[in-house]
């Protein structure tokens, strides 16, 4: 496979949440002003500024740079709270970066969000549906939001859902009767309605049983092989990243600490009892913690 052109180019992207800590001088000034205003205007003014100060600043994504090549399955592997979802939200225009630049197929995401939205679609870890409605009804609703005609939609919904392995019965029965794996496939199907060239999957297999997990992974592989879709997926499953991804960025506390093919990444840690280290060993080697411990 020849992977050359950049589908996504991320340069020094920075995203924070909350306010800077109190010791920042501008924060101190803001607080003083608010306190005196409250004091003069009424005796029981709101302490919004104080409350805001208590919202500690979190740097969720810190000066992150990487490229995703066209047609690639690119994995973002990291523990809970490492910044995976924030990164996905940034790439899908749901959040704007506080610093740095994101280009999607050559378009600057901050300048041309609408163009980027046509190229990209995202499946969230907690995709929501009308659970009393069937996959067909949910997808028709989704298709309307993408501006597809009703006629075009029905044919396409059946085509996509069948391809992802849903039987005729499931297509027309309430979503609440389906397994989580099936529901996740419907979530992917919904994202495919807009024919994205880039699909962002935020933890597509988290919480699925092993069989459903493999089914969803097969769908991801097929989208790459048959449609040439570029896929960015997040996971904290080392095996999944190893088996599925062409390249993996290991993210830790908002920073990328390693980025390479699974084979090359495994060369970063020393052999364990004479055998090749796993990605878990590499993570421990690089961070000094286990993935699970780090999440806690
Ligand atoms: N909307 C928000 N407001 C404030 N803080 C946030 C917000 N979203 C994320 N954060 C914080 O940013 C950091 C990164 O969160 P993020 O959800 O990107 O991590 P994650 O790697 O997706 O974790 P998980 O594996 O739990 O999904 C965390 O410290 C989180 O608490
Ligand atoms: Mg997340």
Image (cartoon, helix red, strand yellow):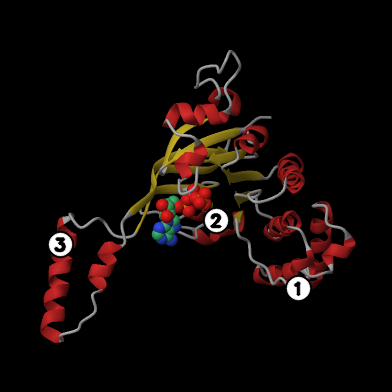
Instruction: Identify the element where label 3 is drawn.
Output: helix
Residue ID at (63%, 61%): 127
> Would residue 6 be visible to someone looking at this image?
no
Counting residues from the N terminus, which is met first, the one under dot 1 or under dot 2?
A: 2
Which corner quadrant of the image does residue 95 belong to?
bottom left
Residue ID at (17%, 54%): 23
The location of residue 53, given as percent across then percent down, is 25, 63
- Residue on which disc 2 sits: 116
- Residue on which disc 3 sits: 28
- Measured in 3D between alpha carbons, the distance from the residue under mark 1 to the one under mark 2, in whole angstroms, is 30 Å
- Residue on which disc 1 sits: 133
Density class for disc 1 (Cα within 10 Å; few <14, some 14-19, many ≥20) is some
Residue ID at (74%, 39%): 225
Q: Are marks 1 and 2 in contact (CB under 8 Å)?
A: no
Q: Nearer the viewer, mark 2 or mark 3?
A: 3
Residue 295 is marked as none
Name above or below for residue 270 compared with residue 74: above
């Amino acid at each position: 496979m020849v992977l050359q052109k950049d589908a996504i180019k991320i340069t020094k992207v920075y995203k924070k949440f909350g306010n800077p800590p109190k010791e920042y001088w501008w924060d101190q000034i803001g607080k003083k002003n608010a306190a005196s205003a409250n004091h003069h205007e009424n005796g029981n003014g709101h302490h919004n500024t104080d409350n805001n100060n208590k919202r500690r600043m979190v740097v969720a994504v810190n000066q992150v740079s990487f490229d995703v090549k066209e047609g690639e399955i690119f994995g973002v592997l990291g523990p809970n709270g490492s910044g995976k979802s924030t990164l996905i939200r940034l790439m899908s225009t749901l959040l704007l970066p506080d610093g740095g630049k994101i280009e999607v197929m050559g378009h600057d995401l901050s300048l041309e969000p609408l163009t980027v939205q046509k190229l990209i679609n995202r499946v969230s870890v907690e995709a929501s549906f009308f659970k009393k409605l069937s996959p067909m009804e949910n997808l028709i609703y989704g298709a309307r939001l993408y501006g597809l005609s009703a006629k075009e939609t029905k044919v396409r919904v059946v085509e996509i859902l069948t391809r992802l392995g849903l039987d005729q019965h499931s297509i027309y029965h309430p979503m609440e009767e389906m397994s989580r794996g099936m529901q996740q496939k419907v979530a992917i199907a919904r994202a495919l309605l807009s024919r994205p060239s880039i699909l962002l999957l935020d933890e597509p297999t988290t919480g699925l049983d092993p069989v459903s997990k493999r089914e969803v992974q097969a769908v991801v592989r097929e989208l790459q092989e048959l449609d040439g879709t570029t896929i960015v997926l997040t996971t904290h499953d080392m095996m999944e990243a190893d088996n599925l991804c062409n390249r993996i960025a290991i993210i830790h506390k908002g920073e990328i600490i390693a980025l390479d093919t699974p084979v090359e990444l495994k060369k970063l840690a020393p052999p364990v009892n004479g055998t090749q280290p796993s990605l878990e060993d590499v993570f421990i080697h690089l961070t000094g913690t286990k993935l699970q411990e780090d999440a806690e």
